[in-house]
Amino acid sequence: MSKKQLIMEKALELFAKQGFEATSVQQITDYCGISKGAFYLSFKSKDELILAIIDHFMEQISIDIDYTVRNVTTDRIMYHFFHTIFLAFSRHANFAKILMKEQTHSLNSKLLTKMQYYDRRTDQTILSIIENVYGNKIKGNKFDLVFAIKGLMNGYANFILFNEIEMDLELISNSLVEKTEILAKHVTIPFITEEMAERFHTFSDDEYSAVDLLHMVEDAFKEADDKISKESLTILKEQLQLQTYSPAILNGLIENIYGRSENKRLGYLLKKYFQLTN
Amino acid sequence: MSKKQLIMEKALELFAKQGFEATSVQQITDYCGISKGAFYLSFKSKDELILAIIDHFMEQISIDIDYTVRNVTTDRIMYHFFHTIFLAFSRHANFAKILMKEQTHSLNSKLLTKMQYYDRRTDQTILSIIENVYGNKIKGNKFDLVFAIKGLMNGYANFILFNEIEMDLELISNSLVEKTEILAKHVTIPFITEEMAERFHTFSDDEYSAVDLLHMVEDAFKEADDKISKESLTILKEQLQLQTYSPAILNGLIENIYGRSENKRLGYLLKKYFQLTN
DNA sequence: TGACAAATTGACTGGTTAGTCATTAGTATA
DNA sequence: TATACTAATGACTAACCAGTCAATTTGTCA
């Protein structure tokens, strides 16, 4: 296990127990059995650590959900969506706790931005599933339903994590599917309307520009340690400035860097940029 | 306005913006235009301040809800419950924000205990309303419904507070009433069962022992500044050890101290202890 | 006005924090 | 073995924190 991983794992435990603010770098390094200096060889700052942790897990969960959304038939998609999320929460309970605790808190503006980014992605995913499953049947209610679902999920997740209950994934997924269906079918008085949701940019797509991606590719290049990754990133950087290669080649180059978990988000964004997603 | 009130109001703003941990006493006193020393004339510590703020608002909200529950006909009780809570949230948006932020966080064990106490009281209130409205019709689902309602309320409150939307109290109350009714009527797969709720003491009544109350009475005595309050508390302290007076007298003594908002909770608990509640 | 008390101040203490950097330990190469 | 390089250390700095208290200002009453 790399030192970076060790620090992330141990810090995760402490953050879940005490919260981010309340955990000192000294505590983390003591718990890892390394010196304080060694910490700063792996991370530029304490902030960088929490950002890395959040990215690491959120990307993993996002990828699982994306996979589910793409590969499950419409009639079971809602079930598998809930199942995927709660499975991830049960596997990474410490991370889920951090997510709950640090949600709206956080002084750190980068952290807040990241949280909002993932929150918006969740909104979009739920919305697209709902549109997929119910079509036009709940047109005026779909935004309201998104927030109802998020509220229910959060409530149950809090209960489970706080009381440290072992989860019955099937039961909770089925219970939430039923509630979603009931609400989709019967609600006539939505609170959150389409204009409300849009006015507050809740569902804005927030595309990254080529320049943003260029910076991210450069950052990834610095972190890369094998030849294939480095070459792939160099070519991708050129292609961001002027696309000359075919989608198949670009896709392959992105796959080359996709193996490392810290590159998953970049890969996802690049595929989106080059319009390689289905 | 007393200095205590000034500090509480200004601190509330800062806590809502930055969180409790991240706000220093120096910041608060600067914002109030007073010296650091003056702060410690009003509050023994920073912790005492946050506890006072939470008690102040939660007691106010609790009293409003209790009043609603007692004085509204069964068929409109659900509506007025939501209305009361969201009215309080819109009036005290800064406090509501603190409540959202500091929920599960907090190292401070007294603060955590207090939060859990109020959370449990909310659970009990919702449960009793549901039992009142739906009776035996949703026997096996009532605990699940409590958490569904809490989840929905939380989700909407978060959306409103975070986006700083002006609230349509009627709409949100009606929307939530409808959802509650729909869920009560149609849910067949509850996630949170009765045994689960009981096993985790979610609805345990958590009675205070005479000894606990004794300490609380003593604390209140130290804070009291008028003769009537002091005498009342002295007598109540004796009565906790050996009850000799009639319920009417005890009730009157409690009413004597009930005026000050910091005594409301103690009054409530004493009435419960002496079985003076209806 | 003067004497006393109460309210207020802000420099100070002791403690903790994130982050730095000169020094040392370890390892690979020649 | 000598050299060169990297990895790791922990004492140190500067900043910040909650809470204290001697000194000062303000208010009150005779």
Image (cartoon, coloured by chain):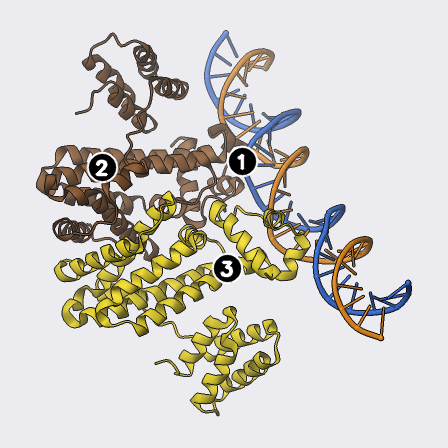
Chain colours: A brown, B yellow, C blue, D orange
Residue A125: give its label.
2
Measure the C-alpha gap from mark 2 to mark 1. Answer: 42 Å
Is A224 situated above or below B261?
above
- Residue under pointer 1: A35
Q: Secondary structure at mark 3?
A: helix
**Residue A121 coordinates in the image, percent (x, y):** 28, 35
**Subunit that carries the residue with mark 3:** B
Three-letter code, disc 1: Ser
Q: Secondary structure at mark 2?
A: helix
- The chain holding disc 1 is A
Q: Secondary structure at mark 1?
A: loop
Residue A140 falls in which quadrant of the image? Answer: top left
Look at the image and tell me in which quarter the N terminus of chain B lies: bottom right
Q: Residue at x 31, y 11 (%)?
A: A235
Local packing at callout 1 (Cα closer than 10 Å; few below 14, some 14-19, many 20+) is few
Q: Is the C-beta separation of discs 3 and 2 under 8 Å?
A: no
Q: Quadrant of residue A166?
A: bottom left
Q: Which residue is mark 3?
A: B53
Indicate whether B81 appears above or below A186.
below
Residue type at tag 3: Ile
Q: Which amino acid type is shown beneath numbered disc 2?
A: Thr
**Alpha-carbon span between mark 1 and mark 3:** 41 Å
- Nearest the viewer among A22 and A272 is A272
**10 Å neighbourhood of mark 3: few (<14), some, or many (≥20)?**
some
